[in-house]
Image (spheres, rainbow, N blue to C red):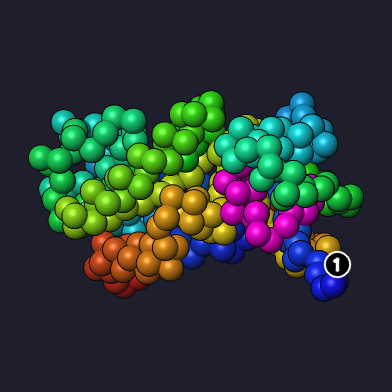
């Protein structure tokens, strides 16, 4: 029997820090939108999972690579508005990418 | 911000522009030619079919309105833009219809030699959309992202080439 593990992608998502929703609530909303647009089976197969993030208004969600397009469409065509800032195949690399982006500057330049 | 999103060039509404100097990755969007356009690359944008004329570079269309409204006025090289922002508030069946209309507008643009443009319609940083997310929408509706980016790059280059040289001199 093949010991096959599906590839995953980890997505760093910027959310509005002034919004009332917490990251886990945002994650739930993305899941609901995913289910509405692509169905329960696809949503379960995508295996969405939220990960710890130390970057202020950045949340990290993991998803199976096969369902990445569905996930990103659910994210973009849903409320609240969210921005994908980085995608990586490993959590370690994603956190490194995000830490190099200098988010404090972007957050402060809102006007 | 454009580097973060993986996009080389961003269109900013004239009213939201805070910079006084031209930047290579910013194009101003304006409803008519203003004096500031002498110093910035710009595009004339319209969302009203009555104000659509030969000077208009970009026409914003609501996918649910249909293409019939612009069929008679669409000229070669006109950019036809669809904003993603209004689709966020739609319920799932309407989002599905929105995606279907997106494809039909793309086909319309191909047959009328217009440039299909998908835009975020963002009014704040949080509403901005990354290049990879645009590609996911294009993949879902069956448009090849590579072709889309190539064509839009050629279109922007043709639209702003002369203006860029003027701005830079």
Is residue A13 rendered to the left or right of residue B76? right
Using the image, determine if residue B129 lies above or below residue A91: above
User: In the picture, residue A41 is in which quadrant?
Assistant: top right
Is residue B55 rendered to the left or right of residue B145? left
User: In the picture, residue B76 is in which quadrant?
Assistant: bottom left
The spot of residue A28 in percent (x, y) is 76, 34
Which of these two is toward me, B101 or A40?
A40
Magenta region includes residue A27: no
Disc 1 packing (10 Å; few <14; some 14–19; many ≥20): few
Question: Callout 1: residue from which chain?
Answer: A
Secondary-structure class at tag 1: helix
Q: Which residue is under mark 1?
A: A92
Span highlighted in magenta in the image: A59-75
Q: Residue at x 19, y 55 (%)?
A: B111
Image quarter where the C terminus of chain B lies is bottom left
The spot of residue A30 in percent (x, y) is 69, 38
As drawn, the residue found furthest toward the left would be B72
Is residue B99 rendered to the left or right of residue A68? left
């Amino acid at each position: 029997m093949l010991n096959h593990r599906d590839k995953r992608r980890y997505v760093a998502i910027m959310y509005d820090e002034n919004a009332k929703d917490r990251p886990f609530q945002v994650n739930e909303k993305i899941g609901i939108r995913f289910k509405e647009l692509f169905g329960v089976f696809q949503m379960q197969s995508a295996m969405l999972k939220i990960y710890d993030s130390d970057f202020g208004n950045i949340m990290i969600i993991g998803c199976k690579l096969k369902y990445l397009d569905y996930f990103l469409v659910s994210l973009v065509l849903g409320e609240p508005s969210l921005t994908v800032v980085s995608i990586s195949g490993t959590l370690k690399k994603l956190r490194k990418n995000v830490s190099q982006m200098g988010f404090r500057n972007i957050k402060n330049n809102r006007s | 911000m454009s580097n973060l999103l993986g996009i080389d060039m961003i269109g900013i509404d004239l009213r939201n522009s805070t910079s006084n100097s031209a930047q290579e990755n910013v194009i101003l969007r304006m409803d008519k030619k203003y004096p500031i356009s002498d110093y910035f690359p710009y595009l004339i944008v319209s969302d009203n079919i009555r104000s659509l004329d030969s000077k208009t570079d970009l026409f914003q269309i609501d996918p649910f309105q249909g293409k019939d409204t612009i069929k008679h006025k669409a000229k070669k090289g006109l950019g036809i833009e669809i904003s993603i922002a209004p689709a966020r508030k739609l319920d799932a069946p309407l989002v599905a219809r929105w995606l279907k209309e997106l494809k039909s507008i793309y086909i319309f643009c191909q047959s009328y030699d217009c440039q299909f443009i998908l835009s975020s319609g963002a009014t704040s940083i949080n509403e901005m959309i990354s290049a990879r997310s645009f590609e996911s929408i294009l993949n879902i509706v069956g448009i090849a992202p590579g072709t889309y980016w190539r064509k839009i790059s050629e279109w922007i280059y043709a639209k702003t080439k002369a203006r860029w040289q003027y701005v830079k001199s």
